[in-house]
Structures are given as C-alpha cells and as structure tokens.
Amino acid sequence: MSKVFKMRFALIYDLYLKKVERKNRSKAELNQIIEWLTGYDAVALQKQIDSDHSMEIFFTQAPALNENVTLIKGVICGYRVEEIEDPLLQKIRYLDKLVDELAKGKKMEKILRQ
C-alpha cells in the first residue's frame, strides 16, 4: 500500500493551498476543483479538511467521482495518470494533476474539462 494513502487529507490540502496561493490562485478555486472531482459540496469538503481522515478515507467517502475524470490526461510524478492501475492512487494523482494545472495558470474551464 502506498504511503500517500495513509497521509492526512488536511495536510495534503494545506500543501495544495500553499502551492496555488504562491501562483496567485485562490482557495475558492482549489475547493472548486476538489468539489468538481469528488462530488463533495463546500460543507462536506470543509468537514473532510477539519477531520483527521487519510487520503484513502477522503476518496472512499467521496460522493461521486466526476464523469469527465477520464478526460484528465498527462504526466504527474513521472506517471501518466490515465495508465495508473491502482484506482485509489489514480484518483489521488488526478487531484494532483488538477492542482498542478491550477498552479500553472490554466483557465478553470480547461481544468474542469468543460
């Protein structure tokens, strides 16, 4: 099992937030992409951030992965996200990819595959 599965979601969220804010993107934009990917609403996402849940629990409890998730393609951490075989690791890397795109200045319409 990957170490990232057991990492606290709140810790990873803080790292994501610092990354996007350094690039002049907002917490609201970060939350929007997380909500788009996972199906959490703002209240449920905040509960996850405030909890002590692992990444594994965060994704296990996610209401519904977005139906357009298969449109997320590219390399993250040296792996093509569309080729990752472990379903949980793939979901985590999808989120990493979306956060990277946000930090790189992509438009929200592109990030959200609209």
Image (cartoon, rainbow, N blue to C red):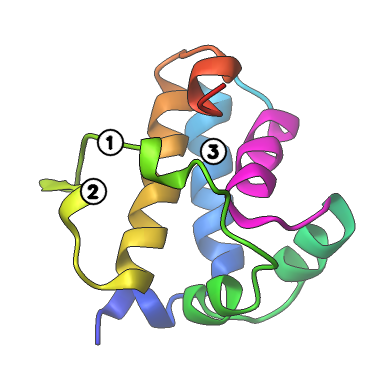
Most frequent secondary structure within the magenta stretch: helix
Q: How packed is label 3: few (under 14 Cα within 10 Å), some, or many (20 or more)?
A: some
Q: Is residue 39 above or below residue 100?
A: below
Tell me whether the residue at label 1 lies in contact with that at label 2, contact meaning CB atoms closer than 8 angstroms: yes
Task: Specify whether residue 87 is in view.
Answer: yes
Q: Is residue 84 above or below residue 26?
A: below
Which x, y percent locates residue 105?
46, 13
- Magenta-drawn segment: 27-41
Front label number (3 vs 2): 2
Which x, y percent locates residue 85?
19, 68
Left or right: where 65 falls relative to 79: right
Left or right: where 42 falls relative to 26: right
Amino acid, disc 1: Lys
Q: Earlier in the sequence, mark 3 or mark 2?
A: 3
Which x, y percent locates residue 114?
57, 21
Q: Earlier in the sequence, mark 1 or mark 3?
A: 3
Badge count? 3
Query: In the rendered image, which residue does mark 3 sit on?
Result: 18
Q: Earlier in the sequence, mark 1 or mark 2?
A: 1
Q: CA distance from mark 1 to mark 3?
A: 24 Å
Query: In the rendered image, which residue does mark 2 sit on?
Result: 82
Q: How packed is label 2: few (under 14 Cα within 10 Å), some, or many (20 or more)?
A: some
Task: Specify whether residue 24 is in view.
Answer: no
Query: In the rendered image, which residue does mark 1 sit on?
Result: 73
Residue ranking furthest to the left = 78
